[in-house]
């Protein structure tokens, strides 16, 4: 058994925009493939070039796609009624980017795709996620770290654009 200490950096922005406005901008930039069709097409690909075409068709203008979402706010509303804060967790990424990290650090598959949290609080709409580079830094692999830093820049740009 081994245990690795991982110190995580959380990137957060607070927007004065409504949650709807932030979500509209995020959803416009991230691909939303039909996941059953996507899984079928990935399984049917016979070469990496064909797979990259499938993935390219699934990602949005940000180069990312939504794998799934969890509406935590809906659960809160079941217990607290309409006064409950809205809170949504999006799982986003790009399988090609994930592959590039996992080739160097297999444990990267535990961290990718990433989770983006969008939630309402008293001071505005918070948009947060944990930086991939902070997850991979302890592994000491410069190639994986470079891919993670590029992914972080992509996601941080996406979130900043959604919040402004």
Image: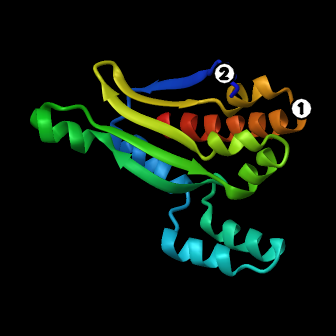
- The percent position of residue 98, horizontal first and vertical second, equals 72, 50
Chain-order first, disc 1 or disc 2: 2
- In the picture as drawn, the residue positioned furthest to the front comes out as 1
Residue situated in front as seen by the camera: 88 or 111:
111
Q: Position of residue 93 (x, y in %)?
A: 62, 50
Confirm whether residue 30 shows in the render.
yes
Q: Residue at x 81, y 33 (%)?
A: 145
Check disc 2 and report the residue beneath it: 6
Observer-nearest of 50 and 160: 50
Badge number at residue 142:
1
Residue shown at 63%/57% (left/top)?
Answer: 61
Distance (Cα) linking label 1 and label 2: 16 Å
Q: Pointer 1: residues within 10 angstroms few (<14), some, or many (20+)?
A: few
Residue under the point 76% across and 44% down: 106
The image quadrant of residue 83 is: top left
Position in image of residue 43 (x %, y %): 66, 76
């Amino acid at each position: 058994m081994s245990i690795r200490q991982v110190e995580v950096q959380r990137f957060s922005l607070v927007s004065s925009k409504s949650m709807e406005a932030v979500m509209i901008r995020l959803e416009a930039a991230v691909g939303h493939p039909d996941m059953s069709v996507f899984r079928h097409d990935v399984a049917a690909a016979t070469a990496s070039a064909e797979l990259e075409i499938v993935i390219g068709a699934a990602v949005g203008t940000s180069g990312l796609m939504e794998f799934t979402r969890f509406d935590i706010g809906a659960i809160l509303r079941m217990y607290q009624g309409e006064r409950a804060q809205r809170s949504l967790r999006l799982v986003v990424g790009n399988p090609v980017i994930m592959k590039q990290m996992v080739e160097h650090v297999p444990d990267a598959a535990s961290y990718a795709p990433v989770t983006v949290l969008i939630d309402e609080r008293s001071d505005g709409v918070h948009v947060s996620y944990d930086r991939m580079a902070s997850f991979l830094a302890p592994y000491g692999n410069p190639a994986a770290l470079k891919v993670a830093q590029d992914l972080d820049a992509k996601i941080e740009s996406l979130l900043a654009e959604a919040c402004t």
